[in-house]
Amino acid sequence: MGEYYDKAMKPLIESEKLKFKTEKCCHICEKPFDNIPEKVMDHDNLKGQFRGAAHNSFNLNYQNPRFIPIFFHNLAGYDAHFFIKQFGEDNSDIKLIPNIDEKYISFSKIIKYDFNKHIKLRFIDSFKFLSSSLDKLSKNLEKDQFKELAKYFPKEQSKCSFGKYLANSIN
């Protein structure tokens, strides 16, 4: 996957230049800039697009993952063996982190496509780290903690807490 991580930053448009000039906080750590020399332009190394102003140290350490994480709640108790059986039908490696017998905390699969390109999928059982129902877990969160969900359901966030929204949409 290394072939995708070397795109130079595209030239900034006027609105991006203004955004960089006026930003007072790092978009990565969300803390203010103490002095101007530590403020740098951060960009997405996959697309080359400007992301925002960042502290130099955070920008240097900010990396795209070398895999795609796929979370299943209670994966080990239900679907893992179906995936592993299906993934075992080709010559690519499967990397497993077993818990007991045929129950796994995590497993990874490299999927090859095109001529020499590949992507690594990492399946993770979130129940091993958050051992409660998704309904109970969501009720422990405040409305502002649903940042990713709010991108796709902005109206629901303003109406109620997502925990209640999720519970109602499932029932």
Image (tube, grey):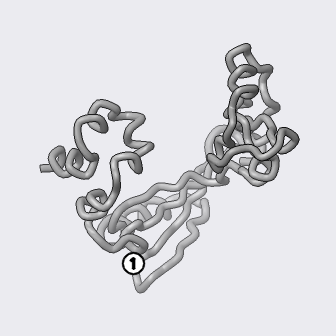
Furthest-top residue in this view? 14
Res. 49 visible in picture = no
User: Which of the pair 72/84 is nearer the observer?
Assistant: 72
Furthest-front residue in this view? 34
| Position of 119 relative to 93 (above/below) | above
| Position of 41 relative to 125 (above/below) | above
Residue at 39% x, 78% y is 103
**Residue 29 on image: x %, y %:** 64, 50
Q: Which secondary structure, mark 1?
A: strand
**Residue 147 on image: x %, y %:** 44, 44
Furthest-bottom residue in this view? 100
Residue at 67% x, 53% y is 66
Residue at 56% x, 66% y is 94
Residue receiving disc 1: 103
| Position of 122 relative to 128 (above/below) | above
Furthest-left residue in this view? 171
Left or right of 59? Residue 28 is left
How many residues crowd around disc 1 within 10 Å: few (fewer than 14), some, or many (20 or more)?
some
**Residue 164 on image: x %, y %:** 20, 49
The three-letter amino acid code for the residue at tag 1 is Lys
Res. 134 visible in picture = yes
**Residue 84 on image: x %, y %:** 44, 66
Left or right of 12? Residue 125 is left
User: Which of the pair 125/10 is nearer the observer?
Assistant: 10
Residue at 71% x, 50% y is 63
